Image (cartoon, rainbow, N blue to C red):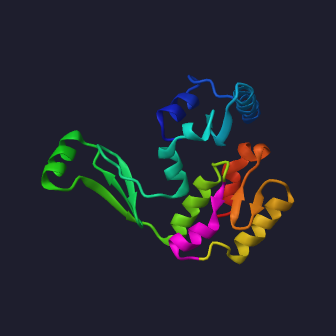
Amino acid sequence: PNTRFGELARAGSLPVLDDSRQADIFVAVGEALVAAGLYRYEVSNFARTSAAESLHNLGYWRGDDYLGLGCAAFGTVGAQRYRNTPSVEKYMRGIAAGHAIEQLEALSPETRLRERIMLGLRMREGVDLGRARSDLGIEPWTRARTQIAAELVAQGKLVRDGDRLRVDDAGWLYVDALAAALF
């Protein structure tokens, strides 16, 4: 709502499709890309082969560390997320002085786990909660999360294979809601 897109939509200057129409288009585009020989490896990304998948994006979705370089860039290293200053002048002065970071946020293991779930469910491979357990040092399979996952599996909305959770082709439209349910 607080973006130029939201402003234009409220003013009636931007055509906004209803959810049903958006879903129809999402499905149609996916079917067309599959018919053209590509496969979906992430909710909004397709490739012809695994060698053509974006390793850069896969790193985000798997919870890997990443450096943010440049004005306003975000980075995550260990349990900290940072944002560089968005001002070019301040950024250049900061680089010369050895620091251009404007914001620093400590990420709790639970926050990092929730981000892994949210981003990991976007991938065809899903999220590996066993890896999350060893990486983050917390138990991802709380009683509540285990129960919710079991309900979603029983409803056919989620697939569980050991510690790995993923959505199937029918679940791509609901991936954000499924992630939120597991928070």
List x then y, in percent, for residue 141.
Answer: 68, 73
**In front here: 96 or 89?**
96
Indicate yes or no whether the magenta region holds residue 129: yes
List x then y, in percent, for residue 39.
Answer: 68, 36
Q: Give the quadrant of residue 24.
A: top right
Q: What residue span does the magenta drawing correspond to?
A: 126-138
Is residue 18 visible to the viewer in this orientation of the structure? Answer: no
Q: Give the quadrant of residue 11.
A: top right
Q: Main secondary structure of the magenta part?
A: helix
Q: Residue at x 80, y 60 (%)?
A: 152
List x then y, in percent, for residue 41.
Answer: 64, 42
Above-or-below relation of 172 to 4 = below
Question: Taking 68 as reference, is 11 left or right?
Answer: right
Q: Residue at x 63, y 66 (%)?
A: 129
List x then y, in percent, for residue 128.
Answer: 63, 62
Question: Taking 148 as reference, is 58 left or right?
Answer: left
Quarter containing the C terminus: bottom right
Is residue 131 visible to the viewer in this orientation of the structure? Answer: yes
Q: Residue at x 57, y 68 (%)?
A: 132
Above-or-below relation of 136 to 126 = below
Indicate yes or no whether the magenta region holds residue 50: no
